[in-house]
Image (cartoon, rainbow, N blue to C red):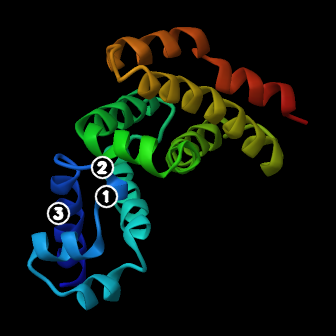
Amino acid sequence: MAQTTKLALELSLKRLLLTKPLDKITVTDIAQDCGISRMTFYYHFKDIYDLVEWACQEDAGRALAGNRTADTWQTGFLAIFKAVRANKPFIMNVYHCVSRKRVEQYLYDITYDLLIGVVQEEARGLRVRQEDQQFIANLFKYAFVGLMLDWIAHDMRDDEQELVNHLNTVIEGDFRRALERFAY
């Protein structure tokens, strides 16, 4: 039941974002749109930004489901792009009204989650310290998120499939090569 209420609150927030910016939406607005009391909202979330963060994590989980491997990272990254585009009013409102830092952190978290799985898979059979694997995942994370932030800042005009294809062309095989350089 709690998950159903949270999903209903997420949908209400996203519906309201189609008509007004995030910084003009109140808990009362969300509760009324959802048909619940304000106290029910606060039972699930401490504030609107907590709901925003939860919604981002839920969207990311759905986008990345099963696409965290060396063979599927492109599909996972493309799914992140598509999830961001599908939630454009939500993402643009968060980007412009809350702060770029929150959007960056959201993207860093989901991208790292995708990349650390790829790095760990590529590290099989190599002796590479965990810290070095994390370093490699972080390095690629910053490149991926930088590309996505630029895409968001330019109103998501570029085709996401083309961006992922270009990225794949540039880094093809680089996960394994980087790990081999750290192997001992």
- Residue 132, given in percent of the width and then of the height, sits at 81, 42
Q: Closer to the camera: disc 1 or disc 3? A: 1
Secondary structure at badge 3 equals helix
**x 43%, y 18%: residue:** 164
Answer left or right for 144 relative to 133: left
Q: Which residue is mark 1?
A: 24
Q: Amino acid at mark 1?
A: Lys
Q: Which residue is mark 3?
A: 12
User: Would you call the spot at circle 3 few (<14 residues within 10 Å), some (14-19), or many (20 or more)?
Assistant: some
Q: Earlier in the sequence, mark 1 or mark 3?
A: 3
Tag of residue 57: none
Residues at circles 1 and 2 in contact by the CB criterion of under 8 Å:
yes
Q: Quadrant of residue 180?
A: top right
The residue located at (15%, 54%) in the rendering is 15
Q: Depth check: give the residue in front, 78 or 130.
A: 78
Indicate the amino acid at tag 3: Ser
Residue 35, quarter of the rendered image: bottom left
How many marks can you see?
A: 3
Marked residue nearer the N-terminal end (2 or 3): 3
Could you give the CA–CA distance between mark 1 and mark 3, rounded to whole angstroms? 14 Å
Q: Nearer the viewer, residue 182 or 37?
A: 37
Compare residues 55 and 71 and report the one nearer the observer.
55
Q: Secondary structure at mark 2?
A: loop
- Residue 179's place in the image compared with 109, above or below, is above
